[in-house]
Image: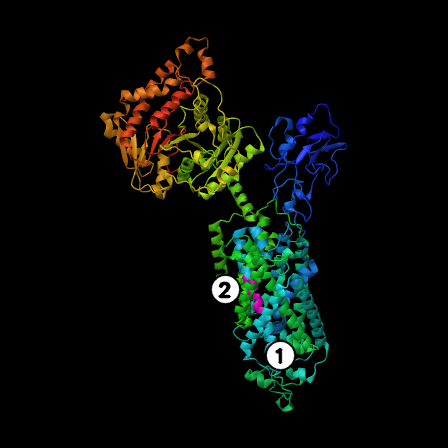
């Protein structure tokens, strides 16, 4: 911790500390030292602004914990603060003449205290926010108490009996209860914004599943508006029929009333959430009154009129009779009844769907949702038991159907015990009353029937209104995330509550289309599968987040179990198929289609999903498991560390290596940023823009950047530190240094030293040379490693380390984030029927053969013919060819064209020898240096690139061989697609770096095809054994 006394000390340079630092290049004081304390631009102390001093008598840059440091948004009317950067706490201000920004960047892009008149906005009025009772519990209870409660629960009780009806209710409640627990856990694992179910799933499982289920859930809610509205319209139509009124006919009357009702609900929704909430409270009060009226009606003794319609108050015989099933009709089975009832339990997410309008979603959603499930489940059980205990299944409603003594023996039905004979209608199946025949049974049982009608109106309209609000809210959040095309039009919000007006209109249109079906029993099963699919994913989200053991999974709601969540997910999927298997397949098919689309588009979002955590766990587990198995030649893969610098600067090098490593082996793009450690250089080395460029180019590669004082040191760090466990590079691949004659000799020594370092660390080494070069930095205006690039002509005897170019930039955003076309390279095009020429001159373990084989496995190179050239004796040419052919055939590489080069050891042409001498001439020791007092050892240590006459003579055979090889390449491989050549190895201490560089230059010069110089680590990478 850096501390500065409150009073100035003699040892502190106040002139240096008074300098004002700017953030992001903006002018004006953001932070300063006035000789007494550190302060913001507005004069507020860093240490004491809204906090106490950490040490008595001292001000300090370090500040205590603060909400602003972790929030992503600004508080209304308050300037957001930022913590000081680690660089500012750690570094000496006096030593850095151009320090980086003092504060970490914020989303506002502005440091504390920075404001301007233009940025001052009028404070907006606070939008309407709801608590857990009004915003969640009441809303969920109203949505659960829907049309099914009043119009279908008595009928389901008659079909399934009280016992199985309780099973249906409890099974539904178990699914919704487990889902409620999972929802509570997810909702309390961080701040929840608008978007409800979609927000919870997408931020937990990622955009792929979240996006697909968001569309389905929004659509299901829009269809649910139609279901509840049709229930309301059925009630109104029944009342009209009782009074003898009619508009057209019963079906069209339901359609007309339904469309008018949905239109009125749309008007309430457009009026705003405040009016919608007031309407919900009114509906809630009406439903409670209707419940009380119903319970009172079951206690009141039955009148003869009610008895004629099957109501006899509480009777043990009726309860016993109705406790067992009485299936009727094509829907008369358990899962048929379950599919009709289950939508009435699906309102548990009504509160979560308006999460953006809650005061504290993390408290309101768990408490309100679970309380709503409890009270509604209890009410369903009570109503099923009470109506099944006081009403028979069949009744005629005719007052004259009293039991006559003469017909007592032939009387059918339980009503016979209470003086009524409904035998005639039971036999003819013409009964119009009773639990099995009348949907309006609760109105008959109640004390005052109009109150039940009012309750039906309240339940249906409140549920329809809640769904009409939920669907656009969920859909709006999905639209704003831009996961799918076109739908972004519906994401626009209006007003202080950001109301999705366009989403309301879309939900209205969908609801009207389904209202026109006008059949409640047809609409309900459609919704069941969509809601079950949503519940399955919510439960799976909770399970997956728990099983991945991510440190970010810390829900404050603890009363959940990951195994119960998994059970809820599995049961939900099973019930989907048991209800309507074809609808389940359609729902799952839609999810898979939308999932595939998002996977294909790969949206640029990062929500820290549990899928990411699971991928990390799997990758870590597999990496650790590799340590338990020793390496085997059969499983050898060329795992490449590619010295690309910023990958966008050498696209050809990236494309070439990516061609044979894609979906096969490891590829790491290494970048060394030269300079001292600072936030700027660290940002340059680790910028995500490099990975973005690789992903955009569809290169499957890692990126690893390091900061080092010089290039060779940085490459050593990469050679020893890149990779993980057994997934580590074993081949170093770099570009050829074309400008070595113009560059400083020390750069040549560094370049050759990198190759020696790789050999010392048992790496295979490859050097790629292309006639047009590899570097794109001149066009891209980006930073590249100065050790590989051109620099002004310098004297060959200087030993000064290279300086960065004048246009050296450390801004990662200037490298690849600017809109630039992706450059095309020769390795991206089809190669046709060309040849791949392999000069296997020395046995390096087989790497020289393995790389071209891997290349031919790719589609672009599959039609190329591989030709293998080996050195030999003209007297034994055919015999040697057969020996090599037999060896290659045992490797099963599929190479059938082998040619022996007997003239490979012939003397090269004199003009080519003179050309080599001219090439090496500037690096040879001159007479003045020989006659000086400097010993050979000192000269070799200070200037290791210098070449003596003795070294020239010692390495003369190798030199002549490289010259001759180039002549052979010119003769045989002028029209090849690519040339692989075994790279010579210069012995350390005996072959100066300039001489080795001249060998590589001579071997690969003036060749039109790309040339890859390959040298394995002298260990086998090919085998013809099966174990």
> What numbered label is drawn on residue 215?
none
Residue 346 visible here: no
Residue 925's quadrant in the figure? top left
* Residue 226 located within the stretch drawn in magenta: yes
Q: Considering the numbered disc 2 on the image, is that residue within a helix, a strand or a loop?
A: helix
Q: Please state, as top left, top right, bottom left or bottom right, where the N terminus lies in the image.
A: top right
Residue, far right: 56
Q: In this figure, which residue is indicated by the disc labeled 2?
A: 583
Task: Residue 451: give x, y in percent of width and height.
Answer: 69, 75
Q: In this figure, which residue is indicated by the disc labeled 1?
A: 239
Which residue is depicted at the point 56% across and 45% down?
613
Q: Nearer the viewer, residue 372 or 243?
A: 243
Q: Nearer the viewer, residue 709 or 92?
A: 92
Query: Which mark is in front, 1 or 2?
Result: 1
Residue 11's quadrant in the figure? top right
Task: Residue 194: give x, y in percent of width and height.
Answer: 61, 55
In magenta, the rendered stretch is 219-227
Left or right: where 491 falls relative to 140: left
């Amino acid at each position: 911790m850096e501390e500065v006394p409150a009073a100035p000390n003699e040892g502190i340079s106040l002139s240096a500390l008074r300098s004002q630092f700017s953030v992001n290049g903006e002018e004006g004081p953001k932070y300063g030292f006035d000789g007494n304390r550190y302060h913001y631009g507005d004069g507020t102390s860093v240490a004491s602004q809204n906090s106490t001093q950490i040490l008595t008598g001292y001000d300090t840059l370090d500040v205590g914990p603060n909400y602003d440091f972790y929030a992503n948004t600004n508080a209304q009317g308050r300037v957001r603060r930022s913590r000081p950067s680690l660089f500012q706490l750690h570094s000496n201000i006096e030593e850095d003449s151009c320090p980086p920004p003092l504060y970490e960047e914020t989303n506002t892009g502005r440091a504390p205290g920075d404001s301007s008149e233009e940025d001052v906005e009028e404070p907006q009025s606070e939008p309407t926010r709801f608590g857990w009772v009004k915003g969640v519990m009441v809303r969920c209870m109203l949505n659960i108490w829907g049309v099914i409660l009043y119009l279908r629960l008595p009928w389901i009780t008659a079909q399934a009996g009280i016992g199985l009806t309780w099973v249906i209710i409890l099974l539904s409640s178990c699914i919704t209860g487990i889902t409620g627990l999972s929802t509570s856990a997810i909702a309390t694992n961080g701040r929840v914004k608008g978007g409800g179910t979609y927000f919870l799933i997408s931020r937990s499982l990622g955009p792929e599943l979240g996006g697909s289920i968001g569309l389905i859930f929004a659509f299901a809610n829009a269809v649910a508006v139609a279901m509840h509205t049709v229930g309301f319209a059925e009630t109104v139509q029944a009342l009209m029929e009782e009074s003898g009124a009619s508009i057209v006919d019963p079906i069209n009357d339901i359609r007309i009333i339904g469309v008018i009702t949905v239109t009125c609900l749309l008007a309430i929704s457009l009026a705003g959430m405040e009016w919608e909430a007031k309407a919900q409270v009114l509906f809630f009060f009406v439903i409670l009154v209707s419940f009380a009226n119903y319970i009172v009606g079951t206690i009141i003794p039955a009148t003869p009129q009610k008895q004629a319609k099957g109501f006899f108050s509480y009777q043990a015989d009726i309860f016993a009779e109705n406790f067992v099933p009485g299936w009727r009709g094509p829907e008369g089975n358990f899962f048929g009844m379950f599919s009709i009832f289950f939508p009435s339990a699906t309102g548990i997410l009504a509160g979560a769907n308006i999460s953006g309008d809650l005061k504290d979603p993390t408290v309101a959603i768990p408490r309100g949702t679970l309380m709503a499930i409890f009270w509604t489940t209890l009410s369903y059980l009570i109503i099923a038991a009470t109506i099944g205990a006081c009403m028979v299944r069949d009744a005629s409603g005719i007052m004259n159907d009293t039991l006559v003594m003469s017909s007592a023996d032939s009387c059918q039905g339980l009503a016979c015990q209470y003086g009524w004979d409904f035998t005639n209608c039971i036999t003819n199946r013409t009964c119009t009353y009773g639990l099995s025949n009348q949907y309006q049974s609760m109105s008959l049982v109640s004390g005052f029937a109009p109150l039940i009608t009012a309750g039906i109106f309240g339940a249906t309209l409140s549920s329809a209104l809640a769904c009409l609000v939920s669907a656009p809210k969920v859909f709006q959040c999905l639209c704003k995330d831009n996961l799918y095309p076109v739908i972004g039009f519906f994401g626009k919000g209006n007003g202080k509550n950001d109301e999705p007006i366009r989403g309301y209109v879309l939900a209205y249109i969908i609801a009207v289309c389904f209202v026109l079906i006008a059949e409640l029993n047809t609409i309900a099963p459609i919704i069941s599968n969509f809601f079950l699919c949503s519940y399955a994913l919510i439960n799976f989200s909770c399970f997956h987040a728990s099983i991945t053991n991510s440190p970010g999974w810390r829900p404050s709601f603890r009363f959940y179990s990951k195994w119960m969540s998994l059970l809820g997910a599995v049961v939900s999927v099973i019930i989907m198929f048991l209800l309507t298997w074809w609808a389940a397949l359609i729902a799952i098919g839609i999810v898979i289609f939308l999932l595939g689309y998002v996977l294909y588009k790969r949206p640029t979002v990062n929500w820290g999903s549990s899928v990411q955590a699971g991928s990390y766990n799997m990758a870590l587990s597999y990496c650790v498991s590799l340590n338990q198995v020793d390496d085997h030649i059969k499983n050898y893969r060329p795992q490449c560390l590619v010295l690309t610098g910023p990958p966008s600067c050498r696209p050809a090098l990236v494309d070439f290596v990516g061609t044979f490593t894609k979906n096969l082996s490891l590829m790491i793009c290494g970048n060394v940023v030269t300079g001292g450690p600072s936030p700027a250089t660290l940002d340059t080395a680790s910028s995500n823009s490099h990975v973005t460029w690789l992903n955009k180019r569809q290169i499957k590669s890692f990126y690893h950047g390091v900061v080092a004082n010089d290039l060779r040191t940085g490459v050593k760090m990469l050679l020893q530190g890149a990779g993980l466990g057994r997934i580590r590079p074993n081949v170093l691949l770099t570009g050829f240094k074309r400008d070595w004659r113009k560059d400083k000799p020390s750069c040549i020594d560094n370049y050759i030293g990198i190759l020696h370092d790789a050999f010392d660390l048992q790496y295979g080494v490859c050097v790629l040379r292309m006639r047009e070069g590899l570097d794109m930095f001149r066009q891209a205006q980006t930073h590249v490693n100065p050790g590989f690039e051109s620099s002004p002509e310098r004297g060959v005897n200087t030993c000064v380390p290279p300086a960065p170019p004048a246009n050296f930039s450390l801004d990662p955003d200037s490298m690849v984030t600017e809109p630039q076309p992706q450059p095309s390279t020769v390795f991206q095009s089809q190669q046709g029927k060309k040849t791949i020429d392999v000069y296997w001159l020395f046995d390096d373990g087989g790497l020289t053969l393995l790389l071209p084989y891997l290349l031919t496995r790719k589609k672009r190179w599959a039609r190329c013919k591989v030709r293998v050239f080996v050195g030999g004796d003209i007297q034994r040419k055919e015999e040697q060819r057969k020996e090599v052919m037999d060896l290659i055939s045992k490797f099963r590489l599929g190479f059938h064209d082998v040619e022996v080069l007997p003239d490979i050891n012939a003397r090269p042409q004199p003009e080519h020898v003179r050309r080599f001498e001219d090439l090496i001439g500037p690096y040879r020791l001159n007479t003045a240096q020989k006659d000086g007092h400097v010993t050979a050892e000192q000269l070799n240590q200070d200037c290791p690139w210098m070449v003596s006459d003795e070294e020239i003579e010692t390495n003369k055979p190798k030199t002549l061989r490289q010259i001759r090889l180039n002549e052979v390449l010119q003769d045989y491989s002028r029209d090849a697609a690519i040339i692989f050549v075994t790279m010579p190895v210069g012995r350390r201490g005996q072959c100066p770096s300039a001489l080795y560089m001249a060998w590589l230059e001579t071997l690969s010069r003036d060749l039109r095809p790309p040339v890859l110089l390959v040298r394995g680590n002298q260990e086998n990478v090919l085998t013809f054994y099966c174990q």
